[in-house]
Image: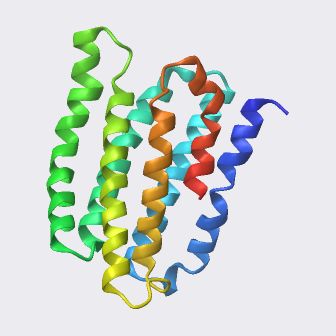
């Protein structure tokens, strides 16, 4: 089995929680619905990127990746702003959400022009993954300290997912635009599933 096919199969496994979420969509709360929608968008982006790579039409892959990175960062900050149990985490998330677009413009559009690099997406992704992993970790501690049982709280589980996604994926994104990124990118899908 080629590595491209393995990446595709691992990428398709995200449909398991997506299908479960869509089946239960009408019985879920606003937080769960927003996360299901986010997973649907992410799944579509993964499928499009995988298809373009498979068809060897990679001209737009970086553009799609950079655009989705912006959407993902905005969603993570918005989600933490809306669900964190403590006002300080909400405030930090809100402020960071407003700084995300200008920071993305600097990293992805301006920085490459000044340095003659292909993209500054690795810098953007690494920074927002580090920040969201710390914020999500802090929010998780707040959930555990403030609630008797966190197991029935969907915000806790989605925040845990953001933590795992951010904390694990930023290691992989630091390898973007290197040879090793092509060898380990499928791990991105594994971390996102967890």
Name the residue rendered at 33%, 30% in the picture. 123
List x then y, in percent, for residue 81: 24, 66
User: Is 192 on the left-hand or right-hand side of 133?
Assistant: right
Name the residue rendered at 47%, 72% in the picture. 157
Would you identify the image quadrant in which residue 20 lies? bottom right
Would you identify the image quadrant in which residue 134 lies? bottom left
List x then y, in percent, for residue 19: 63, 68
How does the figure colour the protein chain or chains? rainbow
List x then y, in percent, for residue 169: 49, 43
Would you place residue 191 above or below residue 102 in this image?
below
Name the one closer to the observer, 50 or 190: 190
Q: Quadrant for the C terminus, please.
A: bottom right
Name the one closer to the observer, 16 or 150: 150
Name the one closer to the observer, 35 or 128: 128
Name the one closer to the observer, 30 or 111: 111
List x then y, in percent, for residue 114: 22, 11
User: Is 174 on the left-hand or right-hand side of 79?
Assistant: right
Name the residue rendered at 22%, 44% in the picture. 100
The residue furthest top is 116
Name the residue rendered at 65%, 21% in the picture. 56
Would you place residue 79 above or below residue 108 in this image?
below
The residue furthest right is 1
User: Is 179 on the left-hand or right-hand side of 98?
Assistant: right
Would you place residue 96 above or below residue 90 in this image?
above
Q: Quadrant for the N terminus, please.
A: top right
Q: How many marks?
A: 0
């Amino acid at each position: 089995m080629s590595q491209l096919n393995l990446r595709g199969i691992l990428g398709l496994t995200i449909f398991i929680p997506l299908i479960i979420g869509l089946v239960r969509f009408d019985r879920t709360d606003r937080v769960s619905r927003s996360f299901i929608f986010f997973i649907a968008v992410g799944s579509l982006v993964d499928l499009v990127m995988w298809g373009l790579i498979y068809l060897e039409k990679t001209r737009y892959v970086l553009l799609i990746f950079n655009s989705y990175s912006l959407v993902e960062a905005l969603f993570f900050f918005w989600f933490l702003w809306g669900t964190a149990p403590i006002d300080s985490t909400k405030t930090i998330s809100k402020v960071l959400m407003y700084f995300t677009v200008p920071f993305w413009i600097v990293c992805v559009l301006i920085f490459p022009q000044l340095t003659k690099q292909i993209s500054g997406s690795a810098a953007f992704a690494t920074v927002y993954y580090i920040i969201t992993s710390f914020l999500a970790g802090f929010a998780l501690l707040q959930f555990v300290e403030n609630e008797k049982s966190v197991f029935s709280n969907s915000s806790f589980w989605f925040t845990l997912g953001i933590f795992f996604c951010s904390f694990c994926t930023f290691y992989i994104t630091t390898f973007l635009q290197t040879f090793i990124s092509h060898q380990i990118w499928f791990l991105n899908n594994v971390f996102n599933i967890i």
